[in-house]
Amino acid sequence: MTTKVGALLGALILPLCGGLRSEEIIHFELAGDHAASLRLAGAATLSPGEAPIVSLTDDSPDSLGAAWAGDPVPAASDRILVHFEYSLSVPGPMPERGALGGGVQLIFAGPGDEPPLKGGESLGVEAEGRSFLGIAIDLGGDGARGPNEPHLEINQDSDPGSEPSLAVSEDIPDILSTASGAGTVRVTALLENGRARVIAAADHDCYGARVVFDELISLERSGDLRIGVAASCAETPALHRLHALEVRTEISRPAFLRGDCNQDGVVCGSVSDLVRLVEGCFLDGPPPPCEAACDANGDGQVCGSVTDVVYLANFCFLGNGPPPPPPWPACAAAESAGEMRCEEPSWCGNETASPLAWLGRNDHGRKEYFRLLDGMVMVQIPAESFEQGDTFFDYGGDELPAHPVTITRPFLLAKFEVSNRQYRRFLDAGGCGGPLCEGCDDTYDFTGGGSVDYDGCHYPEGEAGLLWARNSDYFESPAFADHPVVWIDWFDAVAYSRWANAETSADWEDFHSYGLPTEAQWEYSARWRGQGALPGRYPWGGGEGRFNSPENINLELCNHGDNLGRADSVCSRPAGRSWFGLYNQAGNVYEWTADWYDADAYSTAPRTDPFSSSGADFRQLRGGGWFGPPFSVRSSYRCKFRPQDADVDVGFRPAARAP
């Protein structure tokens, strides 16, 4: 990535490590001295303090202000991601029906100076004929046009007196109820391949995150774009506050297959890669078109010695060498210029865009991403150490001995259990829409050569045609679309998770290949309470007295004890969320992990990133189910279950690599 964004937001530009990069990040979190780098206009003011914010308006009617993210960004970027976080304070009641309520708008304006502000409604600027896209949260009606309730407008004309030129959505009153109550609304806009997607997120009323707009648009691709946030009070006094503004631009890079020095898409099929490497390095032949692909051992050097030739020969022909390091066996772009150049077109083509959209931080302070393929909110879990096992001596058995475990790398874990709606999307994507789907595989051959067919529609042994479809009143009913999918065996959980992660690796010794958390990762995410603190008995804590005491567990915290007679919504019981903001890790449904079950694992497994990659009969479930007693929904509880089996309270929560 060679595009430069000047002195945009000063020191808040993250270092790019030199050379080509697929992503340039302009990060502005209104923190410390860097807050002064934001360009303010109109009534906008900066409030100093430990966590400063920008007030875009004051508390008077017709107040108007804007904040601009420094210098323009290239309109021709493959992807432009803009994220902002916003809250609203209305001293009096929300706008009456038909009143101009004002609001806030994210603005993409074509080349030129910052557009002048224009009052009257939430649009906030006058585009003066330039290329323009506005994503507006309008708090009230617009007189004779548009909805009379809070709504989202997508505009390309910027004229506050005109009707929304692209779309109006009424899907966001619930998220605006947070803003009017001084909560924070998080909005992410993606511009990619002529398409605009708008994602709204909040941490209240089970809102989670959702796509509120997804359509093709017409926006000029030449020149630069000015990006900012403007707000107007219109007829209703209000304060519109900006908490964070971030811009990311992505330009794809050529991807490579490590070891494929001649760029024919094959490694070890013949001696051609070795010949190309020797000719280019030692026989005055032309330089390789992609040095990174010729760097077989991944040490960042080619032609300095014969190490790459020896490494590739040992792996391909002598049978005594390891495979090339990652990204082998997949194609990927170099992480940095230090990984050698790969600037010319290669067999792998260009890298694919990130499958994740940044959603900011949740109300627990944790980074969140929106996975575009399945619409799942993924929470980043940091690397840390914790005490694994039954630290309260409630149950004993295979939960002992309690022992320290270190998670060495951050990872992503789903904020919610996978819902019926999301699993239906997966089945439809694979062409498997129901119990009579052709090609469903009812065999279980994973312990053999690792060649199981992960098609997402396995049947329990002896019950072909029933699995997830046996209760159509639940799985097919719109009333339960956001409830966890159940009757899921381990193979189906892996199939979904690999699909959602676009995972291609077949290295079954690496737990990342499965797209499920390890047993240790799951327990850590459900128990960690902070540095030096004793792990919680439950995700919300519960460390006093007996495990089944009312102060430790009740129905406001956890769906258990057969209270509802079924699973509840995936975002129910916010009081029972974990330290990281994850929902329903206790009760509701059991959740599959990647591990084989090993009763002696706590005595024999490594203390760093443990993973049981082999076993005989059982995989590992965690978290307890909706009819489980208090002891079974403790975060340390281990439940063995045959991978080919499923049940009415068995679902899953996917994992992914952290960006």
Image: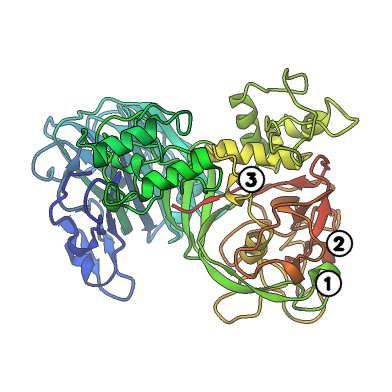
User: What is the x, y in percent for residue 218?
Assistant: 26, 25
| Relative to 300, 313 lies left or right | right
- The image quadrant where one finds the N terminus is top left
Label 2 vs 3, first from the N-terminus: 3
What's the mark number on residue 629? 2
Secondary element at image label 2: loop
Badge 1 marks a residue whose secondary structure is loop
> Disc 1 marks which residue?
548
Judge whether residue 252 can be spotted in this image. Answer: no
User: In the rendering, at what x and y percent does residue 32 appear?
Assistant: 26, 72
Q: What element carries label 3?
A: loop
Residue 497 lies, with reference to residue 606, above or below; the image says above
Q: Earlier in the sequence, mark 1 or mark 3?
A: 3
User: Marks 1 and 2: in contact by CB < 8 Å?
Assistant: yes
Which circle marks residue 508 in the picture? 3
Report how far apart the C-alphas of labels 1 and 3 lie in the structure: 38 Å
- Front label number (1 vs 3): 3
Identified at 76% across, 50% down, the residue is 589
Check disc 3 and give the amino acid type. Answer: Trp
**Closer to us: 412 or 8:** 412
Residue plotted at (48% across, 29% down) = 269
